[in-house]
Amino acid sequence: MDGAGRLARSLRSLGPQADLKAAAIGAVVLLRERLGLRARTRPTIDRTPPNRLILWLERTLPNRTGVALTVLMLLGSAGLGIVKGGHLDALTATLSDTRNALANWAGFRITAVAINGRKQLSQDEVLAIGGVNGRSSLLFLDATTVRDKLKANPWIADATILKLYPGQLQIDIVERSAFALWQQDGRLSVISEDGAVLEPFVARRFVSLPLVVGKGADGKARDFLALLDRYPQVRSVTKAAIFVGERRWNLRLKDGLDIRLPENDVGNALAVLSKLDKDDKLFSRDITAVDMRLPDRLTVQLSEDAAKARDELFKDKKTKKKAGDA
């Protein structure tokens, strides 16, 4: 007899209910043995102690920290998408317009603008350069930013911004003056006394400005032209001042005559040149160049016609001399 039968007989004395229970248990045991099944093992429980960092975070961080971090992560992702997509400027402009609209609604709209010191630039040009438009509000207008934008324009040497609440704006500017025309690499520009390029030469109102030519001439023009002004005899007939090798000046006169000035003691050379023209009508002679680079001499280059006439004159003198000797 198998184990189930023995177990059933041992439990008969407990009554009918015990008999039924014993029979059921015996059947289960017999079924397991017949099918070759083993008793299920108890599930294993991971008794590894939890990570200390996790326990510390759970005790230390306040409630809803995870939610806040998730929101920050989403905002960061959105911001990265805006930057990568090239929409940052548009977003900034939209936010600026929104806050300006609120400020204007609250009574800080710019209702009056006074601009002092402008000569070359119009009022609309000054406002456009400074970034002030019809949507700007006095409350959120950054005076430093407006000043920096104005000073970045070559025509404006300095600027002062004054905000008079609730709606008045005053802008005082110091403009540069057109001083000379500067030619380099075939391009003509209008420059100021300090050498700043104001604009390309297109307007006819600048045609009477003195002309300087060559690399570095823009920065040296003020001092040289001031020296040239001391000798009106020379300045009045000068068409252009040419800066050679960033070291010295040549003068190109209106009739095409070239004056090659020395590198040093330029004032003395201009004085000599002025005296020669006053006494000997040097600029009216048939010459193409005057070389004053050597300190102890002045060399004159005759024109082609004058050189031929001079050669013929010497030939005639030689012929007459031979005839006289004979």
Image (tube, rainbow, N blue to C red):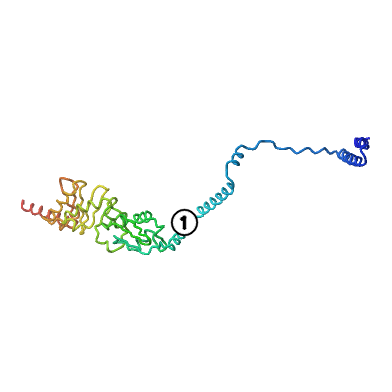
Residue 222, relative to residue 31: is it above or below? below
Question: In this image, 159 relative to 314: left or right?
Answer: right
Regarding residue 130, the answer to whether it shows in the image is yes
In front here: 57 or 202? 57
Question: Residue at (25%, 59%) from the top-left corner?
Answer: 209
Residue 54 image position (x, y, % from top left): 61, 40
In front here: 293 or 110? 110
Amino acid, disc 1 = Thr
In front here: 325 or 211? 211
Q: Quadrant of residue 184?
A: bottom left
Residue 295 image position (x, y, % from top left): 17, 45
In front here: 38 or 178? 38
Question: In this image, 80 relative to 3: left or right?
Answer: left
Residue 258 image position (x, y, % from top left): 21, 54
Residue 321, relative to residue 37: is it above or below? below
Question: Residue at (69%, 36%) from the top-left corner?
Answer: 47
Residue 62 image position (x, y, % from top left): 57, 45
Regarding residue 308, the answer to whether it shows in the image is no
Q: Quadrant location of the N terminus?
A: top right
Question: In this image, 239 relative to 3: left or right?
Answer: left
Q: Secondary structure at mark 1?
A: helix
Binning the other alpha carbons within 10 Å of mark 1 as few (below 14), some (14 to 19) or many (20 upward) gives few
Q: Which residue position is annotated with label 1? A: 92
Question: Residue at (40%, 57%) from the top-left corner?
Answer: 141
